[in-house]
Amino acid sequence: MSDPTVKGLPPPPKSYDGSPYRIAIVHARWNDAVISALVAGTIAKLKEQGVKQENIVVKTVPGSYELPFASQKLIEGGKTQSANAAPSMIASTTNLLSLIDSSTTSSTPAPKAEQAAAAGPSTRPFDAVIAIGCLIKGSTMHFEYICDAVSHGLMKVQLDTGTPVIFGVLTALTDDQALERAGIGRGEKKGHNHGEDWALAAVELAAQTTEWAKGQL
Ligand code: DLZ
């Protein structure tokens, strides 16, 4: 009999507020039922941790083999977008300062649209990427090659870019193993949605690497 105290992700030593962070999800489309459940579980848990809907960017690729390349390109794209947005950020800061200034001479509050624009989607680089796929073993060596390439590829991307990449790839021997790890098992045992764990890991890594980058150890 399995010991329930041995397996699974225990809670982190402290809780993390996900509200400042921008997270990318890139998912394969192979094995859609499993993937859809995993992506939904991931997004729900990210939001529960405080990550804003507008700061969750979701992209798709055909299969898991494409995940490392897509993760790398998304991370680069996020950095480029952030650099391009910098001049308009300065402009909007100036606008906000002028609003503060005018508030000393007038009691009129800032217009709602301007407040909303200031609180719009973040253009900061991605704080973490969650790569989601589902590989199910068939009768050839295809599964072994792809599992190996994807796991090594995703590790390389996070080490090369300095952005955490969460390994959200199920490597299942049977359909039922995959379904149970997405929380949609066919029997009475529905299993557990691992997307929730990947969301928690993304927020934890985003928070910690942000602190460490500032020398807050
Ligand atoms: C080709 C293939 C096969 C057989 N099985 C899966 C799978 O179980 N899960 C998955 O995510 N992708 C699979 N693929 C597609 C490959 O990952 C990849 O998209 C193609 O080989 C094109 O590069």
Image (cartoon, helix red, strand yellow):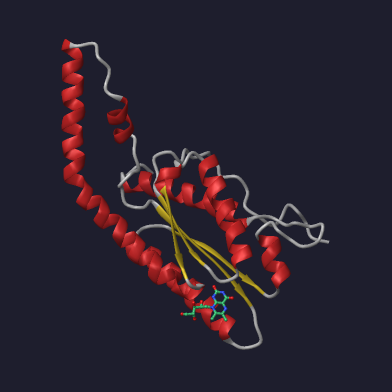
Quadrant position of the N terminus in the picture: bottom right
Residue 44 spot, x, y in % from top left: 56, 46
Residue 11 spot, x, y in % from top left: 60, 45
Residue in view at x 35 percent, y 61 percent: 74
* Residue 67 falls in image quadrant: bottom left
Residue 20 spot, x, y in % from top left: 39, 40
Residue 110 spot, x, y in % from top left: 26, 22
* Residue 24 falls in image quadrant: bottom left
Residue 66's place in the image compared with 54, above or below, is below
Residue in view at x 20 percent, y 15 percent: 103
Q: Is residue 213 left or right of residue 2?
A: left
Residue at the extreme bottom: 140
Residue in view at x 53 percent, y 83 percent: 145
Residue 170's place in the image compared with 200, above or below, is below
Residue in view at x 46 percent, y 64 percent: 60
Quadrant position of the C terminus in the picture: top left
In this rendering, the count of numbered labels is 0
Q: Is residue 198 left or right of residue 24?
A: right
Q: Nearer the viewer, residue 213 or 134?
A: 134
Q: Nearer the viewer, residue 146 or 2?
A: 146
